[in-house]
Amino acid sequence: MSLAKPWRDLDRSTVGSAPDRYALYELGDADGDTVGFGTGILRDELKEALAYGDDAKVRWELAESPGHAERLLAEHVGE
């Protein structure tokens, strides 16, 4: 199930303003269709995703710890 957050363009501005914290993130294509989920330090993960994608979208939910991010992932992907 998708995160209940608005999509943001995955660009340098978004990466630069992303918190340097653990998070669950959702990647989407140019049409806003989900292409995958991930967890980790958000800014680092988005830097890597930006290197691979054009016209990608992203949205995220911040987490308190790596374990919390994994639980959020299980809740959203398991639904």
Image: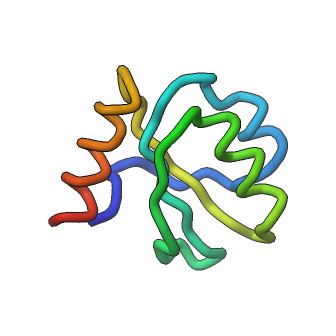
Residue 62 in picture, x, y percent from top left = 42, 30
- In the foreground, 17 or 35: 35
Left or right: 6 in relation to 54: left
Residue at 71% across, 57% down:
49
Question: In which quarter of the view is residue 79 placed?
Answer: bottom left
User: The N terminus appears in which quarter of the rendering?
Assistant: bottom left
Colour mode?
rainbow
Seen in the picture, residue 23 relative to 59 is either above or below; the reply is above
* Residue with the most extreme front position: 67
Question: In which quarter of the view is residue 58 placed?
Answer: bottom right
Residue at 31% across, 32% down:
67
- In the foreground, 33 or 43: 43
Residue 69 in picture, x, y percent from top left = 36, 37
Left or right: 69 in relation to 41: left
Seen in the picture, residue 21 relative to 42 is either above or below; the reply is above
Residue at 33% across, 62% down:
2
Seen in the picture, residue 46 relative to 67 is either above or below; the reply is below
* Residue with the most extreme left position: 79
Residue 16 in picture, x, y percent from top left = 78, 31
Residue 8 in picture, x, y percent from top left = 61, 51
- In the foreground, 43 or 4: 43
Left or right: 46 in relation to 70: right
Residue at 84% across, 43% down:
12
